[in-house]
Image (spheres, rainbow, N blue to C red):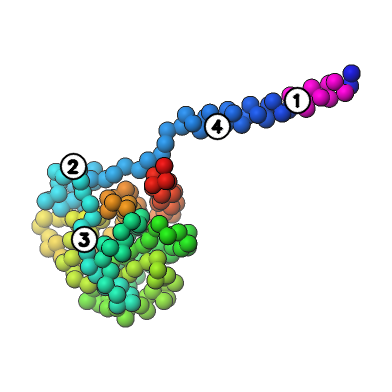
Amino acid sequence: MRSFFSKFKIFGIALLALSSVILYLFYNALQPEKKLPIYQPVDFNEELVDQSLLHKKKYHTVADFSLINQNGKTVTQKDYEGKIYVTDFFFTTCQTICPVMTKNMVAIQDIIKNDDAVMLLSHSVTPKIDSVAQLKKYALEKGVLDNKWNLVTGDKKQIYDLARKSYMAVKTDPNIDPYSMIHTENFILVDKEKRIRGTYDGTNEEDIEKLIQDIEILKSSYTD
């Protein structure tokens, strides 16, 4: 009799375990798949959108570019073709938000350094000061990995147009010179099709954690 109840107990435990697995799988199957939005200019605060884009509702992508990185190499959109990337705007002599942003970008680099699908891109907003040599010095000081992260300088108009018309990264005021100094804490997540999939405060730890999670969500969308 005792043997019978012992076998029944084992059967009951096994059945309970199996039921738990089935319920877990069923629950996960019912959960909506996480997807990131595709941002268009109309989705942003109007202060961040160039007047020429205020009514654009679809098909917005990052414009092609040609800039110079910390190694003196020309970097174009081709270098990011088929890649997810995180981008920002900074300058090497900044003593306010940029050090925090760079620290957080380094943290992201540490996570994606062995991930061929993801890269980083930082634009200098003081290209006359941030020469190739200056960017290289900064890259070495901060631990920038050349194969993962390009710090770029070059034509100021092109960089500022990217900030305002491609990434919606900085406030735009029609009464102010569009090529006066810009300063923005925004990190932007871009997908393989050059579309904006998220914006984050590069100085905020919670936003950085969300960015890291969103990178994974975006990556998973290419493996479905």
Disc ID at residue 11:
1
Q: Secondary structure at mark 3?
A: loop
Left or right, 170 with reference to 141: left
Distance in Å between CA atoms under marks 4 and 3: 44 Å
Q: Are marks 2 and 1 in contact (CB under 8 Å)?
A: no
The amino acid marked with disc number 4 is Leu
Mark 4 and mark 2 lie on one chain; the one further toward the N terminus is: 4
Q: Are marks 1 and 4 in contact (CB under 8 Å)?
A: no
Residue drawn 19% across the image and 69% down it: 156
Q: Which residues are magenta?
A: 3-12
The amino acid marked with disc number 3 is Asp
Q: Which residue is tagged 2?
A: 57
Mark 1 and mark 4 lie on one chain; the one further toward the N terminus is: 1
| Above or below, comparing residue 36 to residue 95 in the picture | above
Given residues 176 and 224, the one toward you in this image is 224
| Above or below, comparing residue 118 to residue 9 in the picture | below
Residue drawn 63% across the image and 26% down it: 19
Residue drawn 69% across the image and 25% down it: 15
Disc ID at residue 64:
3
> Residue 116: where, in percent of width, then height?
42, 60
Splitting the image into 4 quarters, where does residue 89 fall?
bottom left
Distance in Å between CA atoms under marks 1 and 3: 64 Å
Q: Secondary structure at mark 2?
A: loop
Q: Which residue is tagged 4?
A: 25
> Residue 170: where, in percent of width, then height?
23, 57
Whether 190 is among the magenta residues is no
The amino acid marked with disc number 2 is Lys
Mark 4 and mark 3 lie on one chain; the one further toward the N terminus is: 4
> Residue 3: where, in percent of width, then height?
88, 23
